Amino acid sequence: MAIQAPAARPANPRFSSGPCAKNPDFSLDKLSDAPLGRSHRAAIGKAKLLKAIEDTRDILGIPADYRIGIVPASDTGAVEMAMWSLLGARKCTMLAWESFGAGWVTDVVKQLKLDAEVKTAEYGEIVDLATVDFDTDVVFTWNGTTSGVRLPNGDAIPADRAGLTICDATSAAFAMDLPWDKLDVTTFSWQKVLGGEAAHGMLVLSPRAVERLESYTPAWPMPKIFRMTKGGKLIEGIFKGETINTPSMLAVEDYLVALDWARSVGGLEGLIARADANAQAIFDFCETRDWIANLATDPATRSNTSVCLKFTDPRITDGAAFAKAVAKRLEKEGVALDIGAYRDAPAGLRIWCGGTVETADIKALLPWIDWAFAAEIEAQAKAA
């Protein structure tokens, strides 16, 4: 007997965790002011880049004495710049609870070959921050995009730490309240919470990070694309819109449009509220069903952006195949695109809940997950 599909559908089925959905007001004609065919070093180009930096500062509440730079290669480039430029001055500690954090561990241990202390947690869990020595340089992700686990707050980071904190905040910025006084280096990309276009990263440096850059020279060769100092002084132009390499002015315009939209929904507070509402709809859904659960084991560490779910029904014989089949059904129906779990993560679903996603679309999707689950259970039983 065929299982009845829901009548209502999400207006926007894009729930990918990166690149993420454009804001609901987006249209291509809003990019018409992009200075295409012009040098990014022309006055108009530099003005646009500086505006992107200062609007970011304004919306995120970044302190006036923190530097903000637009750098190449998305969040990955920003994290690599920070690690290659800053680490090695003192012992470092690497924290990982999902695949991207594990990637930073690999870079530090196998590429930079530093004697780092490595602390890891399984998917769905988080490292006990009380065991971390913040007199070392500590590298961590604020929100595990592939695990759906985040830091609940920055309380465990001491104000009088001797080391630097290097935080990959790519799926946290614009959706979570980041404690800037606890973060010395913060990185994120445009294509996550604000739904911007790919390839550009943001690097935020505290005065302590700048001091390290100006007083420490790493032992290894430094590629040009990573260099932030010259003659022992910070290259200030990087943090005023004079980018290291050529940026896409179309992508810059798109980011400016996204920042304007962010203001229209209440800035950071409004964006957090939208993400919280989206995630809560999924949490409530899981609470009333015994066959699906949040991958994050502790409610305090559940992400409000990259919500990761696991199937728990004992009738499921092959978890990975089942999860893929459910995601495939939803995509075939055109109600949810790109919501399969990340390839290195436990089998399940990953639904993006950042502020550009409408809560109405999340709520319209949930009955379809019911339908896809039931249909796949039925198909599995018939095949047995």
Image (cartoon, helix red, strand yellow):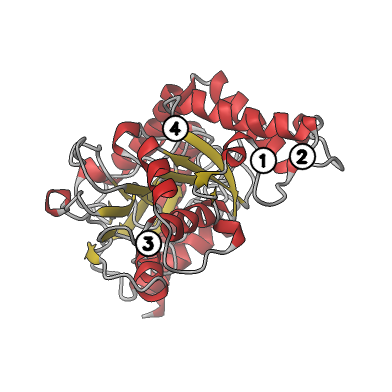
Q: Which residue is at a point 52% across and 47% down the rendered structure image?
A: 15
Q: Is residue 139 left or right of residue 122?
A: right
Numbered label attached to residue 242: 1
Residue 91 coordinates in the image, percent (x, y): 25, 61
Residue 382 coordinates in the image, percent (x, y): 40, 75
Q: Earlier in the sequence, mark 4 or mark 3?
A: 4
Label 3 neighbour load within 10 Å: few <14, some 14-19, many 20+: many
Q: Which residue is mark 2?
A: 41
Q: Spatial distance from mark 3 to mark 1, Cα to Cα?
A: 43 Å
User: Quick check: 315 above or below 182?
Assistant: below
The answer to which of 347 and 136 lies nearer the viewer is 136
| Amino acid bearing label 2 | Arg
Q: Element under label 1?
A: loop
Q: Element under label 3?
A: loop
The answer to which of 364 and 65 lies nearer the viewer is 65
| Amino acid bearing label 3 | Gly
